[in-house]
Image (tube, grey):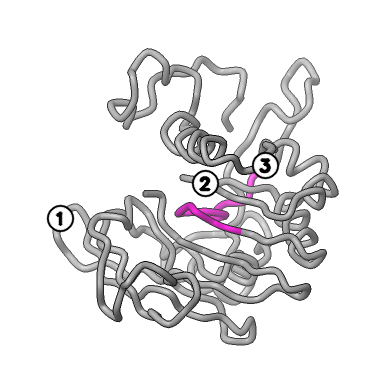
Amino acid sequence: WVSFDRPYANFCQSHLVDRPSSVGSGEFLLWEYPLSYWMEQQGYDVSYISNMDTHRHGPRLQRAKGFISVGHDEYWTREMYANVSEARDAGVNLAFMSGNTMLFTVPLLPSTEGQPHRIIRRESLFYGQEFYEQMVKQRGLKPKYPAAPDGALLMGGRFPFGSIGGGDWTCANPDHWLYDGTGMKNGDTVQGLVGWEWHGDPASDKLGMEFLTHGETKGGDGKPKPPHIATIYDGPKDNVVFNAGTIW
């Protein structure tokens, strides 16, 4: 169990930014901040919502045209999953510019002083019942909590459990509109864009998904890891759900 009231320290990759300013920021200055800076620089009309507010105030998501998950967005509550799913069904576009996203379910528990939403713990996995049962059997675990909904049915793909390393963004669908103007051809790459954790394991084709990438990855020891697969599918109201599936 971990409390938000604990002291904060430098994030382990804080060499990417000025070290003192990373204290207390979690990973915000590494991942969310650069995208926020660029979007505002380009004149986009943006607003911001925290995980806490996504948990507590789901209808607020529907004020926007799009919802973006950035960086390393691993821990979600079941309420967050439900609220973002409802936003998609209401016509909000979703972009998961992140990796290892929506892996573990966490509750938001009160502190010992009674302040709400201060303590989290890992519970179940957003893998759906069948995949969850396979996972716990493979790893010899005894599940304490019921399976959570399948995150891939919302995002399009999921984190291949234990995949840490990297690879190249490898184009697999150059005729898709997402590649318009890039000149990329099938098999072309953007080096080093995939990692340190990524998505693969796409959901079933019943979403009408299209694969945008299919690229090899390797762990830090050089051994092959599951492929990186970026996906996109159409929402119910002329909206789209894009999953870049990489922290980087």
Q: Nearer the viewer, residue 145 or 27?
A: 27
Direction from residue 85 to residue 216 in the image, left or right? left
Residue on which disc 3 sits = 45
Whichever of labels 2 and 1 marks the residue nearer the N terminus, that label is 2
Based on the displayed image, in which of its 4 quarters is residue 88 positioned? bottom right
- Above or below for 156 versus 142: below
Q: Which residue is located at x 85 percent, y 49 percent?
A: 59
- Alpha-carbon distance for marks 3 and 1? 43 Å
What kind of residue is marked 3?
Asp
Based on the displayed image, in which of its 4 quarters is residue 149 positioned? bottom right
Q: Which residue is located at x 17 percent, y 64 percent?
A: 223
Residue on which disc 1 sits = 221
Queried whether the magenta region covers residue 218, the answer comes back as no
Q: Residue 70 bears which disc, if any?
A: 2
Q: Position of residue 13 (x, y in %)?
A: 32, 32
Queried whether the magenta region covers residue 96, the answer comes back as yes
